[in-house]
Image (tube, helix red, strand yellow):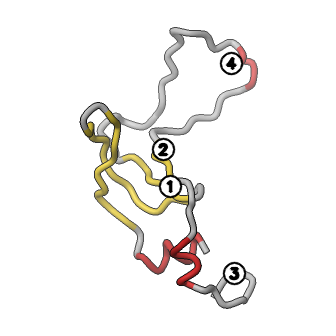
Amino acid sequence: MAADGKHVDVKHVLKLDVPIAVLLAEKTMNVEDIVDLAPGTVITFDKQYEEPLDLLANGRKIGSGVAVKVNENFGIQIKEMKPREDTIRALG
C-alpha cells in the first residue's frame, strides 16, 4: 500500500530505473564559506574514514557498505541492506 492509500504494483516498481549513489559524508556550510572555496581547499567532515558509506536509491538510504577498488574504478561492498519490502515501499 502506498502512502496515499493506493495499491502499489510491485512488478511495475521492480522494473523502474532509479539513480543510486554512495554518500561519503555530509556537512552544512554557510554560503560565504562556499563561495570562498578554491582549488586546493580541504573540507573536513565529522565522519571517520573507516565508517560505512551510505547507499542511496532515489535519494533514500537503502543500505551501507565499505569502499572498494574494482580495477581502476570505485565500488561499494554491501555490508547491510534494509529488508527488500522496506526498499520497495520506499521507492514505490
The residue to which callout 4 is attached is 33
Q: Which residue is mark 3?
A: 3
Q: Which mark is residue 23?
A: 2
Q: Position of residue 67 (x, y in %)?
A: 31, 41
Q: How many marks?
A: 4
Left or right placement of residue 78 versus residue 47 in this view? left
Marks 1 and 2, how far apart in space?
7 Å
User: What is the C-alpha distance between the residues marked 3 and 1?
Assistant: 20 Å
Say above or below: 1 vs 81: below
* Label 2: element kind: strand
Quadrant hosting residue 12: bottom right
| SS for dot 1 | strand
Residue situated in front as seen by the camera: 90 or 71: 71
Amino acid beneath label 4? Asp
Query: How much space separates mark 2 and mark 4, taking CA atoms?
Result: 22 Å
Please tell me which of labels 3 and 1 falls first in the chain: 3
Answer whether labels 2 and 4 touch (C-beta < 8 Å): no
Q: Which mark is residue 15?
A: none
| Residue that carries the numbered disc 1 in the rendered image | 56
- Measured along the vertical axis of the image, is residue 69 above or below residue 42? below
